[in-house]
């Protein structure tokens, strides 16, 4: 196959704007739902926005249920519990409501409600996805409340296999939500530290997609503009959580990152997935801390590409050094730690993390095929802040 050969898939129907959550019930009805199950995380389940969403659906003659037994890094048991709730409640569709964890879990539940195989049989390896009974999957409306993962435009869910302490990617084209609602009003209450961490996750998605060596010029264009939006609006969203324009643009940048990363991810995510599985740390924060270490490690392969990006971002110094300085300055501005030790991760499992990272699905998109030993070195540098 020529290196310019590829298969491209682009996303779904997206409604953007303040107040568009009011269209939730209509979106469910348009997909044929009469009894949706709203799946979210325990924290959000206590907030008025979730009850209001349920009430809107019920007022529109939809019998809406609620499921929120989901961990910060959702695991297979969370998905199984969601399937039980779906079937017990006689539901016919899923509303995926919340941050990346809730969206990933909800999408996996929507897939699993019609399957007779275990979840891990659908891990994104080879043609495993063809095992899915696609006709039995539940329709999905996605409502993100954070601007980072972009799971609302993704055809996969990241779920933790607690038995083997590893994150697995569950994939099927129909796991892509049919309708997305991007309402910035739902993100106004997000604390500054979570706004920063999730926003850096959006940057990580766009950046790793842009640096991936695979052929996808459309993804490159989306990734570049996604990074410009992060540069211009993430500091604003962190400084003023009620800045509606910044909140809107960050939701869009998040969706753009996950649209672009069908081109590939890379070493940031390979290590972050491994650390998330072992330590349960926040995925976006892990990517934010790891970012400069992976960019530096990839320098030989991405220097020219980064310079092109630097010009697009209108950096004072558009070269590789200037780009690195911009990342470090923005992390500092957003109070992102410089080293993993600041979030209680040490070197004890460096060798294991190196092996896990090298075999992680995201590693295939890294510009350089790092060995397990090299991943362990990069991880150790990130623990100690040695850049």
Image (spheres, grey):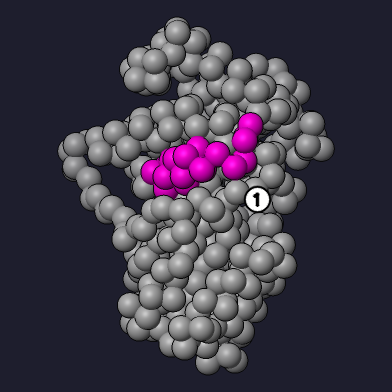
Rendering coords of residue 203 (x, y %)? 49, 34
Image quarter for residue 313? Answer: top left
Q: Is residue 244 magenta?
A: yes
Please indicate whether residue 58 sits to the left or right of residue 278 in the image: left
Q: Quadrant of the C terminus?
A: top right
Please indicate whether residue 363 sits to the left or right of residue 50 in the image: left
Rendering coords of residue 274 (x, y %)? 64, 46
Image quarter for residue 214? Answer: top left
Q: How many numbered marks, from 0 up?
A: 1
Residue under label 1: 189
Rendering coords of residue 215 (x, y %)? 26, 36
Please indicate whether residue 217 sits to the left or right of residue 347 in the image: left
Which residue shows up at 32% across the image and 37% down it?
222
Q: Secondary structure at mark 1?
A: loop
From what the image shows, is residue 24 above or below residue 34? above
- For the record, the magenta segment spans 238-257
The answer to whether residue 214 of the structure is visible from this angle is no
Which residue shows up at 46% across the image and 59% down it?
19
């Amino acid at each position: 196959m020529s290196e310019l050969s590829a298969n491209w898939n682009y996303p779904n129907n997206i409604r953007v704007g303040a107040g568009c959550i009011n269209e939730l019930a209509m979106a469910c009805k348009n997909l044929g739902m009469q009894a949706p199950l709203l799946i979210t995380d325990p924290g959000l389940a206590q907030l008025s926005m979730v009850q209001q969403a349920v009430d809107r659906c019920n007022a529109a003659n939809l019998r809406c249920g609620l499921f929120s037994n989901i961990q910060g890094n959702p695991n297979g048991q969370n998905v199984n519990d969601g399937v039980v709730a779906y079937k017990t409640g006689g539901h016919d569709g899923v509303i995926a409501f919340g941050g990346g964890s809730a969206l990933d879990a909800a999408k996996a539940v929507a897939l699993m409600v019609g399957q007779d195989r275990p979840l891990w049989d659908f891990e994104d390896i080879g043609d495993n996805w063809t095992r899915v009974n696609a006709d039995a999957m539940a329709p999905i409306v996605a409502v993100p409340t954070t601007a980072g993962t972009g799971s609302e435009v993704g055809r996969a869910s990241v779920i933790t296999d607690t038995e083997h302490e590893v994150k697995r990617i569950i994939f099927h084209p129909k796991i892509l939500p049919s309708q997305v609602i991007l309402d910035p009003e739902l993100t106004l209450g997000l604390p500054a530290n979570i706004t920063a961490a999730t926003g850096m996750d959006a940057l990580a998605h766009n950046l790793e997609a842009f640096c991936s060596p695979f052929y996808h010029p459309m993804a490159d264009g989306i990734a570049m503009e996604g990074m410009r939006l992060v540069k211009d609006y993430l500091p604003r969203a962190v400084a003023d959580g009620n800045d509606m324009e910044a909140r809107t643009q960050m939701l869009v940048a998040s969706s753009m990152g996950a649209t672009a990363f069908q081109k590939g991810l890379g070493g940031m995510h390979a290590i972050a997935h491994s650390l998330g599985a072992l330590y349960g740390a926040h995925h976006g924060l892990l990517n934010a801390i790891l970012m400069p270490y992976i960019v530096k490690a990839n320098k030989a392969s991405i220097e020219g590409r980064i310079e092109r990006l630097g010009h697009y971002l209108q950096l004072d110094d558009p070269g590789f050094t200037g780009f690195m300085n911009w990342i470090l300055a923005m992390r500092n501005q957003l109070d992102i730690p410089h080293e993993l030790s600041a979030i209680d991760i040490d070197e004890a499992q460096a060798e294991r993390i190196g092996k896990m990272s090298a075999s992680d699905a995201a590693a295939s998109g890294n510009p350089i095929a790092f060995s397990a030993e090299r991943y362990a070195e990069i991880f150790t540098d990130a623990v100690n802040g040695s850049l």
